[in-house]
């Protein structure tokens, strides 16, 4: 849910009057400056957790687990497991 701030609480009166000429009474969204935006996963640990999970999936695969077994264990589609294995293999190939 996105909270909003009343314009009169943060903007000068002159600016509010100018904005009213274009969007009188409308709710408008003002995006963050490009340098203030965060990439996906930067505000939580989700990105790191998924990276660790994918590394574990690849390690399990290398130890002999089948794609079907991994899909069942991690509650993912077999195609997703195959994609993760391919991505992790490519990462390990790049490190050599």
Image (cartoon, grey):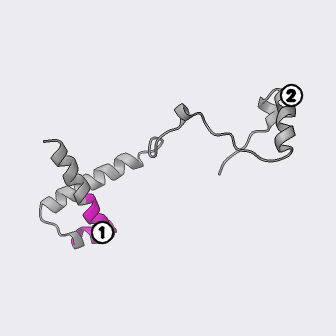
Q: Main secondary structure of the magenta part?
A: helix
Q: Mark 1 or mark 2, which is nearer the start of the sequence? A: 2
Name the spot of residue 83 as percent of width and height, x first.
Answer: 28, 61
- The residues tagged by marks 2 and 1 sit, at their Cα atoms, a distance apart of 57 Å
Task: Residue under label 2, please give it.
Answer: 13
* Disc 1 element: helix
In the image, taking residue 79 as reference, residue 19 lies left or right, namely right
Q: Residues within 10 Å of mark 1 (few under 14, many from 20)?
A: few
75 is within the stretch colored magenta: yes
Range of magenta residues: 69-84
Q: Is residue 37 above or below residue 15?
A: below
Q: Is residue 72 above or below residue 59?
A: below
74 is within the stretch colored magenta: yes
Which corner quadrant of the image does residue 21 belong to?
A: top right
Q: Nearer the viewer, residue 85 or 15?
A: 15
Q: Are marks 2 and 1 in contact (CB under 8 Å)?
A: no
Quarter placement of the C terminus: top left
Name the spot of residue 78 as percent of width and height, x first.
Answer: 28, 71
* Disc 2 element: helix
Name the spot of residue 86 as percent of width and height, x first.
Answer: 23, 58
Point out which mark residue 29 bears: none
Name the spot of residue 6 as percent of width and height, x first.
Answer: 79, 38
Task: Residue under label 1, please give it.
Answer: 79
Residue under the point 59% across and 33% down:
33
Q: Nearer the viewer, residue 79 or 66?
A: 79
Q: Is residue 51 above or below residue 81?
A: above
In the image, taking residue 12 as reference, residue 92 lies left or right, namely left
Residue under the point 25% across and 65% down:
82
Which corner quadrant of the image does residue 77 belong to?
A: bottom left
Residue under the point 48% across and 41% down:
43
Residue under the point 44% across and 45% down:
41
């Amino acid at each position: 849910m996105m909270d909003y701030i009343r314009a009169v609480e943060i903007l000068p009166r002159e600016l509010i009057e100018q904005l009213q000429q274009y969007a009188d009474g409308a709710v408008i969204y003002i995006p963050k400056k490009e340098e203030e935006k965060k990439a996906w996963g930067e505000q939580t640990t989700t990105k790191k957790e998924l990276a660790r999970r994918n590394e574990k999936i690849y390690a399990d695969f290398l130890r002999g687990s089948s794609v079907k077994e991994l899909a069942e264990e991690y509650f993912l589609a077999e195609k997703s497991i195959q994609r993760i294995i391919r991505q992790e293999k490519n990462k390990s190939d790049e490190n050599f």
